[in-house]
Amino acid sequence: MNSRLAFWLPAMLRLFGVLMLSSVIGFFFGSISGLVAAALALAFIALMQLSYLYRLNSWLDDPDSARLPDGWGAWTDVFSRLYRMRRDDEKHQTELIEWLARFRQAMSLLPDGVVIMDDVLFLEWCNPAAERHLGLKLDRDEGMRVTNLIRNPDFMDYIILGRYEQPLILALKDRKLILQIIPFENRRQILVTHDATESERIEMMRRDFIANASHELRTPLTVINGFLEIAYLQPNLDSQTRMSHLKLMAEQGQRMQNLVEDMLTLTRLESVDYPMRPERVAIHSLLEQIQQEAEALSAGKHTITLHVDGPDINGSTDELRSAFGNLVSNAVRYTPTDGAIKISWIEANSGPQFIVQDNGIGIRPEHISRLTERFYRVDKSRSRETKGTGLGLAIVKHVLLRHSAALVIESTQGEGSLFKVKFPSNAVHHPQPVDQAS
Ligand code: ADP
């Protein structure tokens, strides 16, 4: 049955019933009684309709306060449809609230900032990243003009020029931000902020590294090219001069090789494709080898002692040889003739420790925190004189990072230095128990 018929049929039947009843009453009790009965019945029906209309009206005034009234006749259908509409509406509202909560949670996890503004830049909403980047506080700043909150001349110019297809790079509170405004809907705009401080820092480090490495390679290359040019232009040089030129060229060639090797080592240590495969590091024999190499480097100019009183550890022998070797060779290179160098391996409460102590030239305090930066040298000419690449302590830092170890440097200028490597106690190697059954 279609809905129009369903609505009209019972009403017509009811009207027909009233007419029939009043006709019967009129037939038996006279026409006046019939008319009165018909009028009474119609008045009753009208009253009923009015009472339902009144109940519907009161419910519509405050739908939350009362239950939807039960109906009669066509009202049953009206009320049940209204009830269904209300239930659907409540369901949609709940879904909308849940969706909004999910949206807000996702927005709060975003590393990029999102600010929603109206067409005249009044703040409507922003996520926590935008609060951090721009120094906003949603509770405090909602409804305020964004240009009054972000007081920066470049940002003002960006807004005035309105060239929103281009992002704006802004230095704000020690941060490098990339901002862009995206108009959406007719009367709203989104301001997106991206913190580029870290990527900018890495990019700068990369640029510095390339510049430094090129500079370091250029110096020995210039020396070698100079001697080659002399050899070419003056073929009759006496053999003694020629030999001294060849010696200097060989030294510069060696310097370039050391540099390239150190750069490759650093790149490998930083690479994620080069995971560490821990093995048992036989500390005693490793440190004995390092002591012998140090003695060869010192050529008898220093007293080098070794004291080992600690357990073996788990780690990479090659990487630790490189890190410990760099620390010991630094001690030799920065300690004048007749100096003393002590190498020790001990077990402290916090875990094993490798210590190199010298009584060499020492380091002024302002340099200490920067020593592990690539190519950082306290005294460039001294480092070159002693065949340093400026990458030794950067390599040490990366190796220790991979071993969860920490480097502590104590030094007094003119008195000497102490480089201490602290390993965590879980680095200690525990031999596997021997299987009794086998
Ligand atoms: P380099 O190849 O120049 O020695 P490193 O990275 O090994 O580079 O060391 C960085 C700088 O730290 C050195 O140039 C030197 O100035 C300083 N340094 C390192 N070890 C010592 C030490 N034992 N005594 C004094 N200065 C040191």
Image (spheres, rainbow, N blue to C red):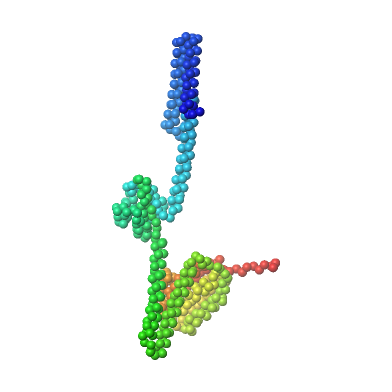
Residue drawn at point x = 44 percent, y = 82 percent: 250
Question: Does 188 sit above or below residue 72?
Answer: below
In terms of depth relative to the viewer, which is nearer, 86 or 153?
86
Instruction: Estimate the x, y position of residue 121 in percent, counting from the top left.
Output: 33, 49
Question: Does 155 sit above or below residue 314?
Answer: above
Q: Does residue 130 appear to the left or right of 161 in the view shown? A: right
Instruction: Estimate the x, y position of residue 264 in percent, counting from the top left.
Output: 47, 72
Instruction: Estimate the x, y position of residue 307 in percent, counting from the top left.
Output: 54, 77
Question: Within the image, what quadrant is residue 381 found in?
Answer: bottom left
In terms of depth relative to the viewer, which is nearer, 271 or 177?
271
Q: Taking the image as drawn, is residue 290 in sight?
A: yes
Instruction: Estimate the x, y position of residue 31 in percent, counting from the top left.
Output: 46, 10
In terms of depth relative to the viewer, which is nearer, 110 or 428?
110
Residue drawn at point x = 43 percent, y = 51 percent: 107
In terms of depth relative to the viewer, which is nearer, 165 or 270?
165
Quarter of the image where the C terminus is located: bottom right
